[in-house]
Image (tube, rainbow, N blue to C red):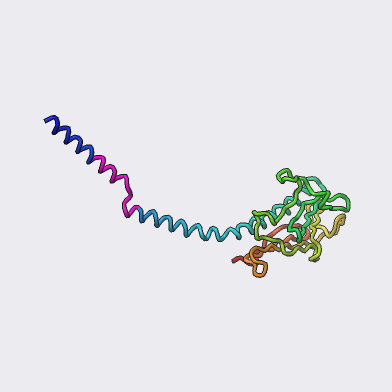
Amino acid sequence: MKRLANDRQTRGTLRRRARGAVRAGFTLIEMIIVIALLGIAGMLVIPAMGSVGALRSQAAVRTIVADLTFAQSDAIAFQQGRAVVFDLNAQTYSVVQVIGRDADATTSTLYDPSRPDGRYIVRLNEDRFAGVRVTSVAFNNDDTNHTLVLDDMGTPVSAIGSNQPGTGGLIRVEAGPTDNPSQIFDIVIEPFTGRVSIRKIKDE
């Protein structure tokens, strides 16, 4: 009798374990739902990956605008002229202190503790701006003039040491293939006020 009871108890334990093993698995419906969700997530990720170039170009434009605005604010704060010097060949620009009639991007670059060399130089050929480039710079209606000069009030002037108001400027930023850019932005510096604005020329 005791043995029979033990056998029943053993069989009951095995059944419970078997039922538990079945419950621990996934049903076909659950697997289908998981696969469908992974597919949807994949479709969302692919466009996001394709927009990386757009994000980089927008980041470059925002960085340039922020640095132009900083140069204006710094000029006002220290009551001293500032200049932003662009180098199209090297794809860099520097924020420079104006000393007398000189704004040397080599010796008078402002100090920036966030950069390894401590110099306020932005390199557009860095990985974070990959595929983005400044294709043209023109200040005071001169496409060979790549230096924005600001007086001690942060206002654009025609030349270093001059009190004559400048006529503003335009910086063109492109992203994508050089022969057919996918994105083109114009950064506009207004005359007299120095107000900085962005015009989207092309965005694919």
Residue closer to the observer: 44 or 138: 44
Residue 45 placement, left or right of 103: left
In this view, 79 is above or below 52: above
For the C terminus, which image quadrant?
bottom right
Residue 70 placement, left or right of 2: right
Q: Is residue 15 magenta?
A: no
Residue 39 occupies quadrant: bottom left
Residue 26 placement, left or right of 184: left
For the N terminus, which image quadrant?
top left
Q: Is residue 25 magenta?
A: yes
Residue closer to the observer: 133 or 64: 133
What is the magenta segment's predominant secondary structure? helix
In this view, 65 is above or below 144: above
In this view, 23 is above or below 146: above
Residue 123 occupies quadrant: bottom right
- Percent across and percent down for residue 199 are 67, 63
Q: Residue furthest top?
A: 2
- Percent across and percent down for residue 184 are 66, 65
Residue under the point 69% across and 52% down: 66
Residue under the point 69% across and 62% down: 173
Residue closer to the observer: 72 or 87: 87
- Percent across and percent down for residue 65 are 70, 55
Q: Residue furthest left?
A: 1
Q: Residue furthest bottom?
A: 179
- Percent across and percent down for residue 18 are 25, 43
Q: Residue furthest front?
A: 3
Q: How many numbered dots are placed on residues in this image? A: 0
Residue 57 occupies quadrant: bottom right
- Region rendered in magenta: 16-30
